[in-house]
Structures are given as C-alpha cells and as structure tokens.
Amino acid sequence: MKAKTLCDIPGKVFKEDPEAVKSLVRDAQFICRKCFRSANRKKHLCKAEKLLDA
C-alpha cells in the first residue's frame, strides 16, 4: 500500500508494524486537524497545523 500521508494509513498498520512510522513521528512538529495524528514534517499530514512550543 502506498499512502500519500500518515492520515491515509489505516490504524491497523500502525499496530502491525510500528517501526515503519517511527521516523515520521519522532520529534513531531505538526498535528493533523482532521485525524489528530502527528508528524515531524508538514507533508506527512493532510491538514497539518504547527504544534506550539511549550
């Protein structure tokens, strides 16, 4: 399966192979306004919004 964004990947894929997405979500800087998944680059999400620094 070739997904354009993390938002397009079914949840069961994360459970079956979490190693496949670790590099995409490590040190997350963005969150998707649609599905609330997070990623370190805007291009990995369909409706990305920058996370605020704490």
Image (tube, rainbow, N blue to C red):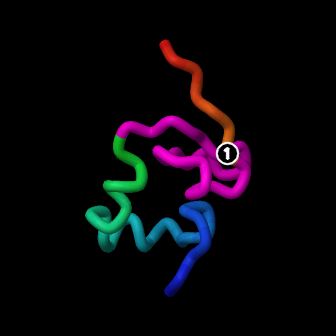
Query: Could you classify mark 1 by the number of other residues whose Cα lies within 10 Å: few (under 14), some (14-19), or many (20 or more)?
Result: many
Q: Is residue 54 above or below residue 30?
A: above
Q: Say which amino acid is labelled 1.
A: Ala
Q: Is residue 50 left or right of residue 54?
A: right
**Principal SS element in the magenta part?**
loop
Q: Residue 22's x, y, as percent? A: 32, 55
Looking at the rendering, which quadrant does residue 10 occupy?
bottom right
Extreme-top residue of the structure: 54
Percent coordinates x, y for residue 9 in the rendering: 54, 70
Residue 17: quarter of image: bottom left
Span shown in magenta? 27-47
Residue under numbered circle 1: 48
Q: Nearer the viewer, residue 35 or 25?
A: 25
Q: Looking at the image, which residue is at 57% across and 76% down?
A: 3
Compared to 20, does 53 lie above or below? above
Residue 49 position (above or below residue 45): above
Q: Residue at x 53, y 83 (%)?
A: 2
